[in-house]
Image: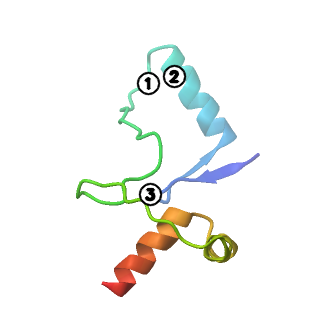
């Protein structure tokens, strides 16, 4: 039986999930639903503006070797320079 650790530290088993599903489907579930944000997490409360720059291909390749996300890498580099 698999166990799943939630962000709040609570652990659920497959049996727990099955039980919750049965209660939800029978409309006897006493839990509470919260909105789940879809998509990537917001990176700032400040409005974002697109800035287009051209850089040498070799720099792009170097970024790709060091980071999983180009935009995040470039944002962090700018923050470090400011």
Q: Which residue is mark 2?
A: 23
Q: Which residue is mark 3?
A: 8
**To which quarter of the image does residue 43 belong?**
bottom left
Give the mark nearer the N terminus: 3 vs 1: 3
Give the mark nearer the N terminus: 1 vs 2: 2
Give the distance between the C-alpha atoms of the residues marked 2 and 3, in whole angstroms.
22 Å
Q: Which mark is residue 45?
A: none
Q: Residue at x 53, y 16 (%)?
A: 25
Could you tell me which secondary element the residue under label 2 belongs to?
helix
Q: Return the residue found at the far bottom.
A: 81
- Quarter occupied by the C terminus: bottom left
User: Quick one: label 3, few (<14), some, or many (20+) residues within 10 Å?
Assistant: few
Could you tell me which secondary element the residue under label 3 belongs to?
loop
Q: Return the residue found at the far left.
A: 46
Contact between labelled residues 1 and 3, with CB atoms less than 8 Å apart: no
Contact between labelled residues 2 and 1, with CB atoms less than 8 Å apart: yes
The answer to whether 59 appears left or right of 80 in the picture is right
User: Quick one: label 1, few (<14), some, or many (20+) residues within 10 Å?
Assistant: few
Which sits in the foreground, 46 or 64?
64
Estimate the x, y position of residue 2 in percent, counting from the top left. Answer: 73, 48
Give the distance between the C-alpha atoms of the residues marked 3 and 1, in whole angstroms.
20 Å
């Amino acid at each position: 039986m698999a166990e799943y650790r939630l962000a709040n530290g609570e652990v659920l088993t497959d049996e727990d999930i099955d039980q919750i599903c049965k209660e939800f489907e029978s409309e006897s579930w006493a839990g509470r639903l919260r909105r789940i944000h879809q998509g990537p997490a917001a990176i700032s409360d400040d409005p974002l503006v697109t800035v287009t720059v051209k850089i040498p291909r070799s720099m792009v390749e170097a970024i790709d070797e060091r980071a999983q996300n180009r935009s995040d890498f470039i944002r962090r580099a700018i923050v470090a320079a400011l």
